[in-house]
Amino acid sequence: MTMIAIMQPTYLPWLGYLAMIDRVDRFVFLDNVQFERRSWQQRNRIKTTSGEVMLTIPVRSKGRRDQRIDKVWIDEAQDFPTRHIRSIQHAYAKAPFYDRFAPELFERLRTPTSLLADVTISVIGWLLRQYSIDTDCVRGSTLSAAGAKDTLLCNISKQLNADRYLSPPGSANYLDRSNVFRDADISILYHTYEHPTHDQINGAFQPFMSAIDLLFNCGPDDGLRILRQGVQ
């Protein structure tokens, strides 16, 4: 029996995203669908002494209205790595596990690349390794499955021989009306996640930050235990 989850790659994802990957046997980065500007695909939040700050990777958009996620080019003229590294340093330099993990994260952000998905997937892979989550991950753009919406998700599941599909609850309104998974004899489950509380610098606890917040504050061992507490 194989359970699969499929999601667009996001930048510096929150705990619920990693918890979904932790629950399944295989995870697919859905990078072969249309890019959504000003979405989590290119940004996420960190907690600073001044409150929540959004870190956004700038992308080239002129004349690229309907581009796929795997074709999105970073606007290198804006030098996002320098700005994001400075913001993370300012926010977490005093966190207990910052010195242990920040240099590797910064190395990935500085790695030269032109494509957004190369950055986001590299950072997610690094986060998974720090939390010792060893789920097999694959990019949708490397698969032959075709279709749109529920048909695409089902065809990916079939190509990877999955009999269970774990979905974010927000997709229930259209998946519950779909017959494609039922016809393929693939069960649909929903990933319900309630954000756990944990030790956190910079004032009162604030949920829904990037998963680096938990890593820098609590480390990987306690971090994985806390991350899993949110699964309902």
Image: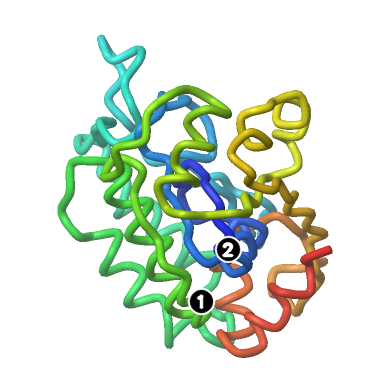
Estimate the x, y position of residue 196 in percent, counting from the top left.
Answer: 80, 69
Circle 2 SS class: helix
Estimate the x, y position of residue 21 in percent, counting from the top left.
Answer: 56, 62
Circle 1 SS class: loop
Residue carrying label 2: 18
Residue drawn at 40 percent across, 46 percent down: 159
Which badge, 1 or 2, comes first in the chain's sequence?
Answer: 2
On screen, 32 above or below 157? above
On screen, 147 above or below 133? above
**Residue 177 falls in which quadrant of the image?**
top right
Q: Residues within 10 Å of mark 1 (few under 14, many from 20)?
A: some
Estimate the x, y position of residue 152 in percent, counting from the top left.
Answer: 47, 31
Query: Marks 1 and 2: CB-CB under 8 Å?
Result: yes
**Residue 137 falls in which quadrant of the image?**
bottom left
Q: How many marks?
A: 2
| Side of 111 relative to 91 (left or right) | left
3D distance between C-alphas at marks 1 and 2: 8 Å
Residue type at tag 1: Ile
Residue type at tag 2: Leu
| Side of 60 relative to 120 (left or right) | left
Residue carrying label 1: 133
| Side of 115 relative to 171 (left or right) | left
On screen, 5 above or below 56? below
The answer to which of 91 and 220 lies nearer the viewer is 220
Name the disc covering residue 151, or none.
none
Estimate the x, y position of residue 62 in percent, counting from the top left.
Answer: 27, 13
Residue drawn at 59 percent across, 54 percent down: 163
The answer to which of 8 and 123 lies nearer the viewer is 8
Q: Residues within 10 Å of mark 2 (few under 14, many from 20)?
A: some
Residue drawn at 59 percent across, 50 percent down: 45
